[in-house]
Amino acid sequence: MWPYPRTLAHRGGGTLAPENTLAALRCGLAYGYRAVEFDVMLASDGVPVVVHDPELGRTVAGSGHVNDYTAAQLGAMEAGAWFGPQFAGEGVPTFEAVLDYCKTQRIWMNIEIKPAPGCDVPTGETVAQATRDYFAKEIAEGELLPLLSSFSIAALEAARQAAPELARGWLVEWIPDDWARTVKELDVVALHCDHTQLTRALALAVKEEGLGLFCYTVNTPERASELLAWGVDGFCTDRIDIIPSMA
């Protein structure tokens, strides 16, 4: 049900590096994390890039929307200095660059499909196809593959059509009443939810359905231990400095 690592570095380096950058991946690895979660959306030229917000300004200097710019233009933007001067010069990385780094370093990936408004289907298709093509050898050899996830049902359905070989997880803030029906319709292997909205009873119900159960974003060792005792299979964390990596 959950053949993946239990602890994932949230957006690469948690609170210790600028999120969704190559520097964040290096930071996570320095703390022993060989499993990460990050977000992928499309630039204006259809190239997938790793960034969370659809609008510039919070972590990437500039104005407008991510999909107003090409991948090359986004790569030249400042995405690290906001966090600290030592990270100045970090740009928005392409999805391919992140795949290259993670594969080279043997880092497992939870790839969140994060479509800009109105781009659910093309983002789901593109991210799934790119992942499938990149891991064609691993698919053929039956090796452990990245997990795709999304809040967008349309993106998950598009990903399934584009690359049925890749497992998918459905992201929700809270688990809705009709979750059991929806996960069957989506053909996902895991349900991902906000840990603050999860109860022991819900965790048990999800596990009884034979699903993987993943939580975001768990930042204290005490809460991590409690969730694992409930049967939660894995979680991402910003506090890679105080929550040790667990395979």
Image: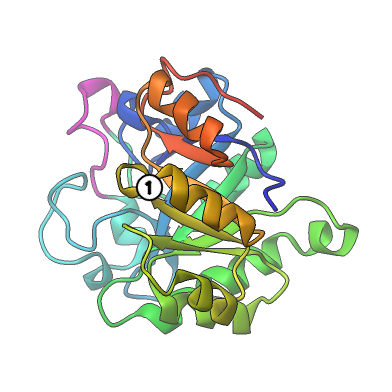
Q: Name the residue under label 1.
A: 198
Judge by depth and name the residue closer to the eye, 223 or 136: 223
Magenta span has 78?
yes
Residue 96 in view? no
On the rendered structure, is 96 left or right of 167?
A: left
Q: At 52% across and 81% down in the image, what residue appears? A: 157
Name the residue located 61 percent from the left edge and 84 percent from the top edge. Answer: 161
Task: List the single residue furthest toward the right.
Answer: 141
Q: Which secondary structure type mostly characterizes the magenta part of the structure?
A: loop
Q: Position of residue 107 (x, y in %)?
A: 63, 37
210 left or right, relative to 76: right
The amino acid pointed to by label 1 is Leu
Furthest-top residue in this view: 242
**In the figure, 183 relative to 98: above or below?**
below
Magenta stretch: give its range.
77-88
**Can you say which quadrant of the picture contains the C terminus?**
top right
- 36, above or below 27, in the image: below
Q: How crowded is mark 1: few (under 14 residues within 10 Å), some or many (20 or more)?
A: some
* SS for dot 1: loop
**Looking at the image, can residue 55 be seen?**
yes
- The foreground one among 186 and 201 is 201
Q: Which colour scheme is used?
A: rainbow
Q: Which is nearer the eye, 81 or 144?
A: 144
Horizontal side of 31 relative to 138 (left or right) equals left
**Quadrant in which residue 147 is drawn:** bottom right
x, y percent for residue 106: 69, 36
Q: Where is residue 14 in the image (x, y as percent from the top left)?
A: 36, 31
Does the segment drawn in magenta span residue 171? no
**Total number of numbered discs in the rendering:** 1
> Which residue is located at x 57 percent, y 40 percent?
231
Task: Determine the residue positioned at 40% across, 41% down.
Answer: 11
In x, y percent, where is residue 138? 81, 56
